[in-house]
Image (tube, rainbow, N blue to C red):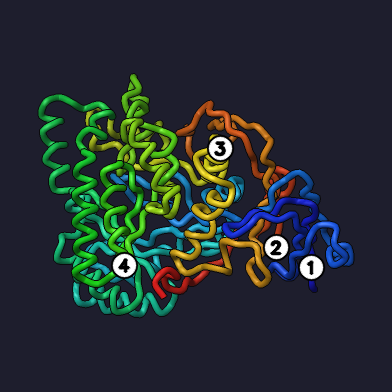
Amino acid sequence: MSTRTLIRGGLVVTAAEETHADVLVEDGRVAALAAHGSAAARAWTADRLIDATGKYVIPGGVDAHTHMEFPFGGTFASDDFESGTRAAAWGGTTTIVDFAVQSVGHTLREGLDAWHAKADGKCAIDYAFHMIMSDVDESSLREMDGLVEEGVSSFKLFMAYPGVLYSDDGRILRAMQRSALNGGLIMMHAENGIAIDVLIEQALARGDVDPRFHGETRHVLLEAEATHRAIQLARVAGAPLYVVHVSAQEAVAELAAARDKGLPVFGETCPQYLFLSADHLAEPEFEGAKYVCSTPLRPREHQAALWRGLRTNDLQVVSTDHCPFCFRGQKELGRGDFSRIPNGLPGVENRMDLLHQAVVDGHISRRRWIEIACATPARMFGLYPKKGTIAPGADADIVVYDPMAVQTLSAETHHMNVDYSAYEGRTVTGRVETVLSRGEPVIDGRKFTGRAGHGVYTPRATCQYLS
């Protein structure tokens, strides 16, 4: 049974252009666009009509960095794939790329299968997986090839968290060499974890136990040093590199220098680094624990370099690193010892709105908003043009966005399964009104109409910036 939806009267904004156009959706895909009021558009008929007059019609967001139900510090992220993808839909995101985790001593396949089991039948929107490699050896290197072929084409390694997720330079180099051959993309958590652990040990010995010391021990220069080292290892391997959650101006400078040499090096930042700062970590009465994430929030002066990096394309993507832990019972595990606070912030629901606020504030243009939040993450991780744009043949992942609506972000009204908002009380201009996922309304006039299991697993091609 064919179903047709007509979205009429809106301003269609993609990374490439802005145009007053009507959008015809048929059988879950974009069938056609035509100028509003044109003979072609007037001739269209549909089962469902969405009036987008005065609104933006934008591609659904692609959040390429989430951690649903992620194990960390003896607990798990408080959003599972059901609650987390529902919240994502409320925020105008229609695809997430989450991280499956290889446990030490186990195969990549076992880790991937475990994450498929977590997500299968639960998701309200479409999803894909990256693979975290915790155990680089001959067997896991061989497994990388098969995973790339079946659509898991990116692999995350950690220079941080010794004894847990950490890989030394030799293992990183070997994984990069393999990715240079199989077309995979190495994603790097770039912090010098060995040195950070020394600073943590020294801080705790001094009695510096409050959340603000989480940021102070994860020094900006240790992010910059690790970013530099990752870039040099990638050069030796002849491999591309994607550095996740860049937070410091010194790290941006390392990426910019590499890109000025023409190297295939890419960078991601997150809303928390653009809108929050180390001041939040210093909030009294342990409130700062709410803002503990890694890389950490930096002093406010770093924000200008991040915005500049987004404008100059030295940073290409804004993802959330959504990894929420409730303040009560989870963040509180670190009372008296900041190193025991679970690392992570909620944000999958807030990203599109915060970045629209950046448009309002003049940091970025409307098309750049869509580029960094939709099109580039889709291209970077092999989902374009199925995802990330509004064009004939693309999946009808479409958001009708009210650019004039004013809302106040709050835990009282958000849909993430976490007991606080990192942006509590912040007023932003712009709000999601209606969301289609493959043509099906999952948010309809500010009502959730989706369901667990609508979202499907989406295999990915290799990075589309390298061909």
For the residues marked 3 and 2, what is the alpha-carbon distance in whole angstroms? 27 Å
Asked whether 116 or 94 is in front, the reply is 94
Q: Which residue is mark 2?
A: 439
Q: Kindly indicate whether the residue at mark 2 contacts the one at mark 3 (C-beta within 8 angstroms).
A: no
User: Which residue appears at 25% of the width and 26% of the height?
Assistant: 210
Vertical placement of residue 307 versus 394, above or below? above
User: Which residue appears at 31% of the width and 35% of the height?
Assistant: 298
Q: Kindly indicate whether the residue at mark 2 contacts the one at mark 1 (C-beta within 8 angstroms).
A: yes
For the residues marked 3 and 4, what is the alpha-carbon distance in whole angstroms? 32 Å
Q: Kindly indicate whether the residue at mark 1 contacts the one at mark 3 (C-beta within 8 angstroms).
A: no
Residue 8: % across, % down: 80, 55
Q: Which residue is mark 4?
A: 240
Q: Is residue 440 found left or right of 232 in the rendered image?
A: right
The extreme top residue here reads: 284
Where disc 4 sits, the SS reads loop
Q: Nearer the viewer, mark 2 or mark 4?
A: 4
| Mark 2 residue type | Gly
Q: Which residue is mark 3?
A: 357
For the residues marked 2 and 4, what is the alpha-carbon distance in whole angstroms? 35 Å
The reply to whether residue 401 is visible in this rendering is yes
Where disc 2 sits, the SS reads loop
Q: Count residues near mark 4 (Cα–Cα under 10 Å), then give few for <14, some for 14-19, many for 20+.
A: many
Q: Count residues near mark 2 (Cα–Cα under 10 Å), then give few for <14, some for 14-19, many for 20+.
A: many
Please give the label number shown on residue 371. Answer: none
The reply to whether residue 435 is visible in this rendering is no
Q: Earlier in the sequence, mark 1 or mark 4?
A: 1
Vertical placement of residue 466 versus 66, above or below? below
Q: Which residue is mark 1?
A: 3
Residue 62: % across, % down: 52, 57
Residue 464: % across, % down: 45, 70
| Mark 4 residue type | Pro
Q: Earlier in the sequence, mark 1 or mark 2?
A: 1
